[in-house]
Amino acid sequence: MSVNELALENERLKSELEEYKKRYQSLCDFMSGTSHELRTPVNSIIGLCELGMEEGGSEYLSQIKENAEYQLSIISDILDMARLQGGAVVLYPEAVSLESFEDSLNAVTVPLMKKKDIDFNFEFHDIFAGTLVMDKLRVKQILLNLLSNAAKFTPERGRVDMTVSQLPAPGEMVSTVFTVRDNGIGMSKEFLEKIFLPFTQERTAATASIQGSGLGLTISKRLTELMGGTMTVSSKPGEGTEFTVELTLKPAGEEGDISLGSSGSLDLSGKRALVADDHSINRILEVKLLKKAGMEAEAVNNGFECLKKFMASGPGYYDLILMDVKMPVMDGLEAARRIRELNRSDAQEVKMIAMSANAYPEDEERSRAAGMDGHIGKPVIPTVLFSDIARVLGIADRKGKVKT
């Protein structure tokens, strides 16, 4: 190797080393920030519980709830980011009325604005398709992130506006534009260039006390792009910020589209389910969700008990098994394999859905290999649960459309 080639190779290695150092520092900063964001509310929850127990009062409960909800939002952001990076996010479109969608957004947003006496206005402009087919949960997640940020970064007695407008799009589609505008602290031009990067937050004297994971906008933009839409932002320090989300959506026609977001929209009367989950509170919630949809439901606390319960039942007794993956004694995957291997007429027919906090494609593949018909992430979201139940039971196809 010549002297020039050695010099070039040396420069390349130096460049790679510098890039590695930057990535390592970025990871260290992220882990430090995440550790702080996760630990702080947990410490608050523990401390408040101790005070409540010592003093025998209940005035701390609302603060406990607030800290717990913040902790859950951080965990949800981390899980969503992992799923997006792993390509494991599945959309569940349904027919959604914009009027009801406004109500669901206002239910969360209005109290946030009232806390700071912010003038909040929600308006529709030029709407000609009042009901659209979209993933209500994910669109709501995107807009609530933008609205909660607007509330965080707008001073008391400020103003936040949200508008929804429409334009015709090719193929009888509708271009629906959601705009969130505030007159808050705004952002610098330099920060706007990296605003959608993961774990990025602009640290100034005005934002030092504001909590957040630095993942919300990254997740919102990636979800928007997953739906084929665009998200843009404009901002000036001291003047405010405007986010625009544009989605091309299909108007909901009379083609049997159903809303699976609420249990009342899916009639599972006459169906029977067996729930296996080692977490007692989760078992209660999962059974209640199924019963609200009209389903008969029983619950056990591990895979072995699930296997025994199924073996003790008559052929065709259970229509569905909702199975947690990680359980003591026998996990959900092993239980599913054992059920499929049974020498009885319904062993191959009963529908099984896996539940797991791990939602990467390889996790879903392992569930399928074990004999599961579906795989949903935890925490269990009713929209996702009912959509998957409708699909595996043959009530609806993968797009949420009723089969006739």
Image: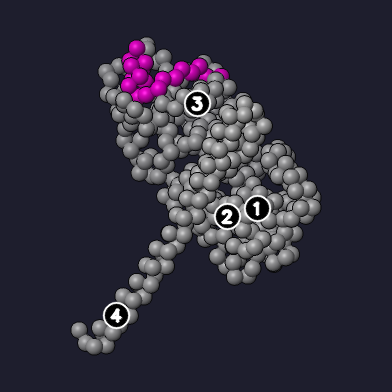
Residue type at mark 3?
A: Ile
- Give the quarter of the image for residue 10: bottom left
Say whether residue 264 is magenta: no
For mark 2, does the 10 Å Cα neighbourhood hold few (<14), some (14 to 19), or many (20 or more) residues? many
Q: Nearer the viewer, residue 58 or 206?
A: 58
Mark 1 in CB contact with mark 2 (< 8 angstroms):
yes
Q: Nearer the viewer, residue 204 or 382?
A: 204
Decide if residue 317 is in sight here. Answer: yes
Cα separation, mark 2 vs mark 4, equals 39 Å
Q: Quadrant of the C terminus?
A: top right
Residue type at mark 1?
A: Asn
Across and down, in percent, residue 158 comes to 78, 55
Q: What residue sits right under mark 1 in the picture?
A: 149
**Farthest residue toward the front?**
54
The nearer-to-camera label among 2 and 3 is 3
Q: Earlier in the sequence, mark 2 or mark 3?
A: 2
Say whether residue 301 is magenta: yes
Residue 217: mark? 2
Q: What residue sits right under mark 4 in the picture?
A: 10
Residue type at mark 4?
A: Asn
Dot 1 falls on a residue whose secondary structure is: helix
Residue range corresponding to the magenta coloring = 294-312
Across and down, in percent, residue 286 comes to 50, 26
Q: Residue at 35% across / 19% down in the picture? A: 305
Q: Does residue 278 lie above or below 123 as drawn?
A: above
Residue 281: mark? 3
Decide if residue 254 is in sight here. Answer: no
Q: Nearer the viewer, residue 74 or 376?
A: 74
Q: Earlier in the sequence, mark 3 or mark 4?
A: 4
Q: Does residue 198 lie above or below 46 as drawn?
A: below
